[in-house]
């Protein structure tokens, strides 16, 4: 960088210097730097009337949302909301539909637009004017949203009844009732969740209110509403009109007056918990139209109209105030709007964006602007090293042996403060060339500064045009910067930043893929784009096809002409985990696909769930057709519908005929019915065994009826034996495929218990092949009387008697 360019830059800053609290220990040196200046005509932005518009500006160098309040005053509650980028170009125009009355709106640090309508419904829009999601804050549809107080990640919504609701995390939209305000509200301020002195603080809502039922001198109240704590209700002597929390969450600036004395207003600087008032600044009868913004952490900027007419082109002045009575004033023609930043404030006019900041003097940065003699170590080193002719022929670093440490730190601090890219690079180059001389120099600090500056430099240039200072980047945080880039549809730059700083890229791919699904491209092309991206990055691009399919179905629901349902089905097909497809199929009434996906998952519990849900939705026939083709599905069906009359047919379809016959058999047994239909069904499926079992059951039931008993085949046989009708018992046994010899031996066991000569003589005749010897030996061992045994022995063959005598079974 040429020395002449360096001098020109610092001269311009020097000319912009305004000193606040001059001559005191609280002196602040304020400078204005141009962040953007239009050289072309910008009809959309230049047509904005600052006096008739409401602005919501994303903090940390973000874009602007603008609404013309004239429409509202004329009865049009559906005005356009226009989004402008940080190069003052129009991004999109959002026209609210008829019937949606706007209560408030907000632009998050990630540059997501949040709208709240009077019914208490939240709408989240992307920068193309598409609704991303909605949330009903009130369960009671009769409530109306009368107040809202936004912060980075949430919003307090207050109904006309004074009920306070908190919506936390705009990604999850968790709603909880936070308290109740019994008074009339005059001002609100939210203290977001933050940390201070190693302590963490939850979100809190401060409410300035009026007790209309109290006496006039006791009407003003100050309330603090916190989570899970009783509301703090304090009487105040002032009537609060405005409350603004500082970016550091350390102070609250309050505009107030005594009672109704609006001609004598004051600004009070309170600690964040209102326990201490640090200063009071009287502002008299300043118009109620003035606006108040923090400038960094320590001073306020008041936007005050300089004339009373309401014509276009009205002039404003900017007044800086602080803890003392000192003030600074800037005049602007045609109006402007102020955006608070952590290190100052952005002043946005019709033609340019200026950054108003205090130049710190404790780290030597101020000397770069004011030290024209270049005696300060940092400025002296910067001048010596950037003069290439001197640096090429001499070694100027030897002159800094005692001051090199301070000089390096001052140059490093200056590189993080100034916004000119060439100046930043020159300062970093000086540090890089000189740091080896100082053994105490913190190289890690240098690396961290380079990282932040490199990101800021790339953000401020085309095509992004997001002027950020390192202080703003630090407050924004890298993860939210990545989301902001995604919201601007600069996904490739978001990925570059993530790769550079080592952040995960999952959220980037997710956001990009959802944008692709929302596009108007044909379904097949969208799927191809997603698959090509995943293939291009070797699987690193994690694309959740289920999430995308759900989005596609939601889009189709809101606009059936979009054909997004077809896209949803195609996206579901790309997912390899079948169980994840099931809920979405059910949600969209695709029962056949849901059952098939559940079968593919091989999860019986999931199948039972799908079948039950399908039956609840009258999908019996469809489910019936599907479950017969899978064993696991059939098992799940039988657990849900064990008594269904068509279950046997399902077994047949599954090529399991024997189980079908068993099912019918068990049903007939439970119902006490004949087996004729079971026999017929078993014959039709060629189950011979089933036919035999069914016939046996019929024979048993017939015999039971004839004998007047209930029981099984053994019970029938025992009954015949009890009657002494062995032939009938054996005949029955034959009909039910039981061995007749087994029946004879069963009769022998019963004979031992009640032996008679006739019974013994009849029974021994039934035994063949020497079984009569075994019978006689058994009854002899059992202690049957010798007389009965002898008579039985006399009836058997001679060789049997001889065997019994030889073996001493009888005598």
Image (cartoon, grey):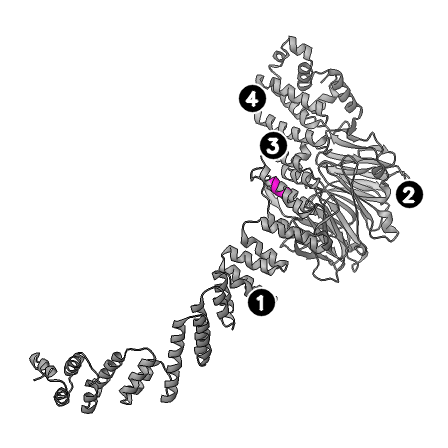
Mark 3 = which residue? Answer: 500
Of the image marks 3 and 1, the number of the one nearer the N terminus: 3
Mark 4 = which residue? Answer: 440
Of the image marks 3 and 4, the number of the one nearer the N terminus: 4
Of the image marks 2 and 4, the number of the one nearer the N terminus: 2
Label 4: few (<14), some (14–19) or many (≥20) C-alpha neighbours in 10 Å: few
Determine whether label 2 and label 4 are within 8 Å by CB. Answer: no
In the image, residue 165 sits, relative to residue 733, either above or below, namely above
Mark 2 = which residue? Answer: 310
Residue placed most toward the observer, 521 or 464: 521
CA–CA distance between discs 1 and 2?
72 Å
In the image, residue 434 sits, relative to residue 320, either above or below, namely above
Q: Is residue 532 magenta?
A: yes
CA–CA distance between discs 4 and 1?
81 Å
Residue 100 circle label: none
**Which mark is nearer the camera, 2 or 4?**
2
Q: What range is drawn magenta here?
A: 529-533
* Residue 537 figure quarter: top right
């Amino acid at each position: 960088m040429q020395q002449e360019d360096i001098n020109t830059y610092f001269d311009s800053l020097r000319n912009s210097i305004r000193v606040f609290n001059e001559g005191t220990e609280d002196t602040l040196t304020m400078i204005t730097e141009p962040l953007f200046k239009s050289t072309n005509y910008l009809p959309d932005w230049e047509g904005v009337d600052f006096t008739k518009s409401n602005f919501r500006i994303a903090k940390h160098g973000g874009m602007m949302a603008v609404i013309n309040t004239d429409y509202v005053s004329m009865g049009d509650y559906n005005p356009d909301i226009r989004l402008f980028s940080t190069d003052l170009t129009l991004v999109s125009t959002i026209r609210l539909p008829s019937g949606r009355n706007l209560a408030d709106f907000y632009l998050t640090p990630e540059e997501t637009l949040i709208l709240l309508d009077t019914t208490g419904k939240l709408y989240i829009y992307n920068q193309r004017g598409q609704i991303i999601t909605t949330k009903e804050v009130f369960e009671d549809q009769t409530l109306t949203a009368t107040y809202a107080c936004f912060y980075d990640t949430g919003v307090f919504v207050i109904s006309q009844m004074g009920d306070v609701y908190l919506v936390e995390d705009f990604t999850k939209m968790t709603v909880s009732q936070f308290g109740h305000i019994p008074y009339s509200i005059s001002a609100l301020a939210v203290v977001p969740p933050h940390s201070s002195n190693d302590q963490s603080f939850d979100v809190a809502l401060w409410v300035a209110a009026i007790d209309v039922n109290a006496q006039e001198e006791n009407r003003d109240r100050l309330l603090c509403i916190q989570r899970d704590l009783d509301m703090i209700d304090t009487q105040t002597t002032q009537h609060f009109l405005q409350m603004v929390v500082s970016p550091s969450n350390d102070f609250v600036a309050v505009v107030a007056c005594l009672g109704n004395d609006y001609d004598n207003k004051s600004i009070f600087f309170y600690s964040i918990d209102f326990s201490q008032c640090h200063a009071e600044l009287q502002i008299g009868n300043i118009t109620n139209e003035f606006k108040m913004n923090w400038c960094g952490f320590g001073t306020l900027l008041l936007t005050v109209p300089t004339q009373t007419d309401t014509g276009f082109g009205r002039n404003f002045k900017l007044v800086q105030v602080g803890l003392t009575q000192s003030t600074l004033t800037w005049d602007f023609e045609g109006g402007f709007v102020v955006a608070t930043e952590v290190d100052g404030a952005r002043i946005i006019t019709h033609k340019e964006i200026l950054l108003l900041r205090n130049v710190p003097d404790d780290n030597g940065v101020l000397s770069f602007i004011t030290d024209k003699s270049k005696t300060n170590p940092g400025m002296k080193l910067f001048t010596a090293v950037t003069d290439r002719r001197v640096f090429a022929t001499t070694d100027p670093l030897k002159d800094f042996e005692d001051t090199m440490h301070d000089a390096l730190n001052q140059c490093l601090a200056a590189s993080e403060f100034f916004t000119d890219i060439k100046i930043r690079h020159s300062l970093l180059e000086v540090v890089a060339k000189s740091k080896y001389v100082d053994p105490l120099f913190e190289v890690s600090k240098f690396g961290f500064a380079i990282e932040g500056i490199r990101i800021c430099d790339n953000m401020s240039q085309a095509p992004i045009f997001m002027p950020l200072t390192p202080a703003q980047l630090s407050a924004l945080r890298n993860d939210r910067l990545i989301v902001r880039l995604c919201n601007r549809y600069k996904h490739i730059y978001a990925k570059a930043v993530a790769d550079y700083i080592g952040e995960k890229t999952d959220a980037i791919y997710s956001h990009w893929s959802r944008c692709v699904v929302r596009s108007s491209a044909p379904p097949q092309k969208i799927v191809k784009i997603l698959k090509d991206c995943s293939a291009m990055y070797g699987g690193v691009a994690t694309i959740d096809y289920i999430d995308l399919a759900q989005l596609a179905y939601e889009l189709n629901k809101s606009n059936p002409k979009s054909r997004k349902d077809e896209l949803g089905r195609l996206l579901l097909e790309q997912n390899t985990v079948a169980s994840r497809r099931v809920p979405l199929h059910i949600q969209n009434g695709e029962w056949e696909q849901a059952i098939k996906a559940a079968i593919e998952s091989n999860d019986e519990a999931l199948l039972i769930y799908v079948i039950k849900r399908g039956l609840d939705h009258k999908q019996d026939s469809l489910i019936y057709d599907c479950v017969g083709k899978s064993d696991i599905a059939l098992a799940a069906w039988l657990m849900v519908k064990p008594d269904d009359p068509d279950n046997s047919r399902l077994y047949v379809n599954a090529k399991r005929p024997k189980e079908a016959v068993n099912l019918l058999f068990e049903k007939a047994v439970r119902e006490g019915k004949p087996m004729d239909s079971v026999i017929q069904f078993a014959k039709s499926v060629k189950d011979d065994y089933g036919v035999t079992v069914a016939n046996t059951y019929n024979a048993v039931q017939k015999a039971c009826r004839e004998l007047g008993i209930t029981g099984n085949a053994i019970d029938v046989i025992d009954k015949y034996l009890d009657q002494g009708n062995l032939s009938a018992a054996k005949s029955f046994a034959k009909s039910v495929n039981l061995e007749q010899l087994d029946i004879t031996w069963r009769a022998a066991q019963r004979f031992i218990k009640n032996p008679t000569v006739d019974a013994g003589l009849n029974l021994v005749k039934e035994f063949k092949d020497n079984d009569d010897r075994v019978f006689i030996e058994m009854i002899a061992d059992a202690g049957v009387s010798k007389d009965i045994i002898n008579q039985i022995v006399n009836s058997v063959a001679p060789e049997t008697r001889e065997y019994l005598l030889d073996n001493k079974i009888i005598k």
